[in-house]
Amino acid sequence: MSTNELTPRERDLQLMVTIARLYYEAGLTQQAIASRLKISRVRVNRLLQRARYEGIVEIRIHDPMGTSDVLAGELRAALGLNDAVVAPASSEDPAELADIIGERAARYLEQVLADGDLVGLGWGHTVYRTVQNLAPAEGKDLTVVPVTGGMGATDPPFRSNELAQAFAHRFRARWVPLEAPFLVETLEARQVLCQQEMIKRVLDLWERLDVALVGVGAAIEQSPLLRSTHFSSHDIIELESHGVVGDICSRFFDRAGKPLPTGFDRRLICAELEHLHRIPKVVAVAGGLRKVSAILAAAQAGHFNILVTDRETALALLNRARRAPSRRD
């Protein structure tokens, strides 16, 4: 039978099998597959997800040494976490690493999310890849809300409403948009915005979250947010003078995990770090050696209680944690 004689469904199945073989058996990256087949990387990713969902691909991991489980257990103990997941692979390519961690985080969330959960969604490249890696589900009784404003963002990983909508779509769940930027020009403008009913409704939901999915930002000189037009050179100098090591939801902190009281912090429309401490499950998705200091500080300060990371980052975190006393109260 020629390709022209196939039904659209049969062509889709054939393409899914081809892509799955190239990805899982030949070891090609999604971008390499897209280039070879002359289709978009987004379509390759979606067909790989469908292949898993429809049973064309079944992933089974056999780790004779139990290395990933051992590392996860050691991370839980060393960082005082409720749970940890360690992907057995790592990569020096940030995009590939985000996909490695995002795939593992997606599988974890699919297992732990329960009917009735109110889910807060942060932003960033690894959060974005987590959402993209979620397999379509039959439906869960979830409500999803952004925990940071994002109107006007041009980079997809920072379009908070689109991320929340995509997350909810995977589970056929509800979502509530946050119609606000993440940073406004004055404190007065923030106060006025936060009194608007549509925005206040979301801010009130932040106090009732059951689960939050957040990324951990890197050191200041590598933060994509600080390369945007939202932050002035004065803001960057102020953060550096305070010894910033990273951020969660644009809330910057120092090596002890202590929030930094900057001039712009009160102008942010983002969940505060103290909000995260009241959420039963805060899942941080982050990896890469450049983020080790930020992840360690945030974990020891209790800004998240579940970590999904990669093998090399886990080893570096353990090495650092064993050399330094915990700063958690």
Image (spheres, rainbow, N blue to C red):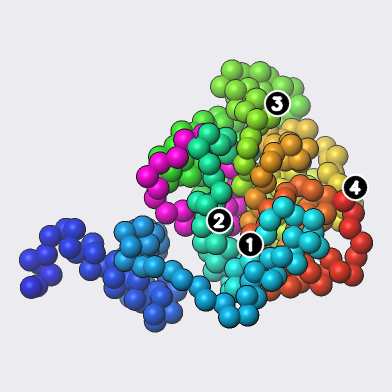
Q: Position of residue 134 (x, y in %)?
A: 46, 53
Residue lying at 79% horizontally and 48% vertically, measured from the top left: 302
Q: Is residue 192 left or right of residue 89?
A: right
- Badge 2 marks a residue whose secondary structure is helix
**Residue located beneath label 2 in the image:** 108
**Residue located beneath label 1 in the image:** 85
Name which of mark 1 and mark 4 comes first in the sequence: 1
Name which of mark 2 and mark 3 comes first in the sequence: 2
Q: How far apart are marks 2 and 3 (CA)?
A: 36 Å
Q: Tell me, yes or no, whether the two marked residues, 2 and 1, touch with CB atoms within 8 Å.
A: yes
Q: Position of residue 99 (x, y in %)?
A: 53, 64
- Badge 3 marks a residue whose secondary structure is helix
Q: Which of marks 3 and 4 is in front?
A: 4
- Badge 4 marks a residue whose secondary structure is loop
Residue 120 - label: none
Residue lying at 40% horizontally and 48% vertically, measured from the top left: 137
- Residue 109 appears anywhere in the view: yes
What type is the residue that disc 4 sits on?
Asp
- Residue 246 appears anywhere in the view: no
**Residue located beneath label 3 in the image:** 190
What type is the residue that disc 2 sits on?
Tyr
Extent of the magenta region: 120-144
| Rendered view: 315 above or below 43 | below
